Amino acid sequence: MRFARRRLLNTLVLVAAGAAAWGWVRRADTVLQPTSLFTGLALLAVCLGLALFNARKKLPFIPLLRAATWTQIHVYVGWFSILLFLLHVGFRPPSGVFNITLAVVFGLVAASGVFGLVFSRVMAFRLTLHGENVMFERIPALRAQLQREAEAIVVKSVEETKSTTIADFYATRLQPYFARPRSRLRHVLGLESPLKGVLTDLRLLKRYTNEREHAILAELVDCVEAKDNLDFQLAGQGLLKYWLFVHIPLTASLLILGAVHGLIAFTYAGGFR
Amino acid sequence: MKRLQPFDFKGSRYERPNQNWVCGRKDCGDACPLGPDPKGTCRATTECKPRKEGARWFCTRTDARGGKCPDGPRPDGSCCRTIPPCTPRRSVRARRGQAVFLVSALTLGGVLLALGLNNRDRTFNPGPLTAAHASSAANCDLCHTAAQLGAKGWLAGAFTSPSGHVDSQLCLKCHNFGPQAEQPHSLAPVALAALTKKVSVAAGIPGPTPGHPVGDAAGLACGTCHQEHHGSEANLKNLADASCQVCHSVQFAGFGSGHPEFGAFPYSRRTRIEFDHQAHIAGYFPAAAKQGQTPPTQCNDCHTTGTDNRLMLVKSFAVTCAACHLDGITKPGTKGLAILGIPGLDKKSLDAKTTGIGGWPADADGDLTPFMRQLLGTDPKAAAALATLQGTDLTNLAGAKPETLAAASDLAWAVKELIADLITNGHSALQKRLGTGVPVTALGQLPPESAQAFTQAGWWPDLLAEVAAHRAGRAVAPPPAPPVPVAVSQPSPPPSSVPAKAAGNDLLGGDDLLGGDTPKTAAAPAKPVAAGDLLGGDDLLGGPTPAAPTTPAAPKAPEPLAPEKWASAGGWHVSPADFTLRYRPSGHGDAFLAAWLDLTAGGTAPESRALFTAIATASTCTKCHSVDAASDGAAAVLVNWHAAAPEPQIHTFTKFSHGTHFSLLDEKGCQTCHQFKAAAGTTYTAAYKDNLDPAKFTSSFQPLNQAVCAQCHTEHGAGTSCLLCHNYHVGDVAPAKVRGYFQPPAPKA
């Protein structure tokens, strides 16, 4: 409820600010003010302010609002920047090599931001509900640990049952599964899990094993399910981290191109005079 | 589900994702606890650093790494479990930082590269130019002074570059909007304020807005409204109606809802050519038709659109009026306008009481012609004499005061000197008297050689000698016998080649070099001679003329034609009856009358006014061509020689294209919009009587009905944009200048 109220309030503020900006630009256009210069300057300032969010994250010791507050500001000001951009270009597709490049970069930054926002809302929820929550940095080590455990179970099965049925199955089917992260895209997209196929194969194997081997297979099933969870966590958390590989570098590019664009525009337009 | 991640004091490692480097064996679950240093160098040595207690060394491996090892430290105190070195790798955060650096460097490099390339202008061009400007796309400096700064100067230029007004001057190199191009409506602020005040007072609306809400004292830069780089099809003149209403305080929703009434539009003044439509259509045209003529039946018989298809113009005189009115201009029988003449003087009194005025026709009794007053007006002595003699009857100076007589004498000699100057100096004399500012057309149309008629006609046979003597200060005796005017006729136009001569006064007569001893007496009347007889009846080799004819009677000479008849087709002729040289217009558009009407219309001196009035009265020009007071408020006037025919480049606040509306007319034709006003004839013509103010008038037509326009001009119909019917830039808006370069011819080798 609190989240819904906050979202409603912030959305209302965003809509009001957008309407005010749109109305002002229309009015200024009518009285032949150089609105492109005004909106361009505002857009550059807004982009700089949005970029400060990253700097704020690197300086956690500064007591300047909470990170959550910064995130909220970043999200809604980001939406506002898209409106400013549209007002700046006059709701027309830009033209000219440099301007098109700048617009494309802005579009990519905005699109990646929207993607990150949506994904951080959806994926975080899914990650919370999906098995054990593990730290992203620990996942490779945990996967290696899990692989060692599975191999230990297989060795144990050979020693105890004098049968290589499970060992052969592990060598051909499970070893590649544990060797590296699997099916990242399927996990991200929420498609049918690859776990089902592995578990089916294990269930089919069961008819060729005895009671003792059934217990060993049950242990392997636990390992397989844990591995599947690690894959899911890696895919989800990885995407939550790696979308910033698009958003932040392009933001830097956007600021550089925007500064050059502003410089040229001011020079050629003679400023506000 | 199996849980993998322990969270306890001993089993859980502390992760530091903000560090730039992580152990190379981290993914294997075997990362060393120390990890790489900040520069990414592996610091792995051994699993622990044994601690010495007394003489023994003890293992210090943590529980998280398996606790104390079974082998324990070596005797020298070193750990027995060496950690093989790894290749540290960057953390996710560090790799993201790398990506930021890489993309930034690429962007900056790309920008610098683009700035350094030859086609920089094309790269940073913010968009295609309109088709008209497309050729300038690769030369930014043609329209932007900042482009001359170069890329290096852009940073400083952002704060110091010239304002848009300087760039506007580049626009105005090709586009001409007059000296006030950047001011609102291209009008001087004072003129605009006055105009706005006039309109606001008339309409009862709030007064003018001081200045423009956008521009500064220098006005609005061209780029304020005309924004380029929006594609080849962009409309640079596109402007929202609301922009007009920023200044125009009477705001309304659209043309059909709230637009101010047209008022008297488009009739803001009387027509330049006085033409009573109603009188002609109702009276004159039917009468002409009854007489077998073919008068106009449609508006376009007399009107046609101009080259730009906008305004309806009046066709030429020859097409429209000549059929009925040409005869009135060259009507036979009229004497024409007296240009030069000998005024009447009481010669007897002057000869008796002054030093004399030389020869003077005794029968001359006319006044000084206005032309002569104009020419004498620049002679100080003559001007003073004229002032003194104002109201004096020059033909009766018997009881005149000495100063009056002296003035009369001065005037007489001034007249003679004028004629003599015209004979001897020609146009130079005219220019000297009228001033150098007089148009050549006016000078050229008054042939000074025509003054020779004064001597050739025998009025002043010794004029040049008398004037020379007078100027030398010698007394001039009157001639022994006063000449008698002889009917002289001469064809038009060359007065200088007048063939007729008066007997006894012709070059060969009287004092003819070859003449015999023809007895002459003062009382002997001159013989009329046939026109064209150079010898005037005298025998070239003549001896004494026989007293009585012995030969059969010669065939009777034809009666000489009256001079007016000779000049019936127009031109110059001598009028012996009143000692004047006269001019009759040769037809419509007579150059002489037009030139002198224009010349005297601009003058404010009484002589000019009198001459203008004389020409206007004597001629029929101003019967149709209205005369307006000059717009500068001086006493001078101007003659409207032509009907309204605005130049296409002269923009007014309102524009209308007649041509595009023709297809919309129904059977009412032009009267769909231009409807006659009931019984306007009398008041229409009254506006031209003794009225020099063209704004005081009564139109023959009713004002335009706005509702007629509003039938089609709706928002979704023909449009209601302000700029559809109104011009923003008014005045002389010449089209873009043409750079008419030409290649000079190569010099000859």
Image (cartoon, coloured by chain):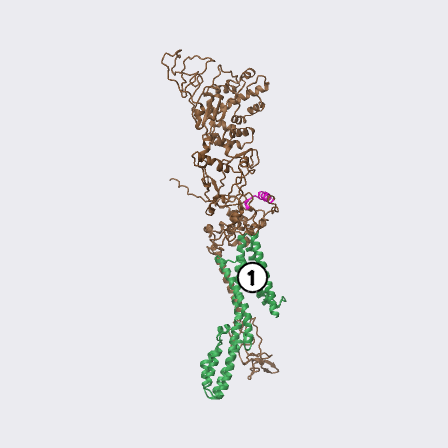
The answer to if B194 sits in the magenta stretch is yes
Q: Please name the amino acid that badge 1 sits on.
A: Ser
Up-down relation of residue A49 to residue B136 (above or below) = below
Q: Residues within 10 Å of mark 1 (few under 14, many from 20)?
A: many
Q: Which residues are magenta?
A: B185-200
Question: Where residue B337 appears, x then y in whole percent?
Answer: 49, 27
Nearest the camera: B31 or B188?
Answer: B188
Question: Where residue A20 appears, x then y in whole percent?
Answer: 59, 59
Q: Does residue A230 appear anywhere in the picture? A: yes
The answer to if A73 sits in the magenta stretch is no
Q: Residue reaching furthest front?
A: B290
Q: Which residue is mark 1?
A: A81
Nearest the camera: B14 or B472?
Answer: B472
Query: Which quadrant, please, contains the N terminus of chain B?
Result: bottom right
Nearest the camera: A117 or B451?
Answer: B451
Q: Magenta segment, principal secondary structure?
A: helix
Check the rendered structure and report the hue given to chain A.
green
Q: Residue reaching furthest top?
A: B547
Secondary structure at badge 1 equals: helix
Up-down relation of residue B277 to residue B533 (above or below) = below
Q: How many marks?
A: 1
Question: Where residue A248 appears, x then y in whole percent?
Answer: 54, 65
Question: Where residue A91 appears, x then y in whole percent?
Answer: 52, 58
Q: Does residue A33 appear anywhere in the picture? A: no
Q: Which chain is brown?
A: B
Task: Give the letter of the chain under mark 1.
Answer: A
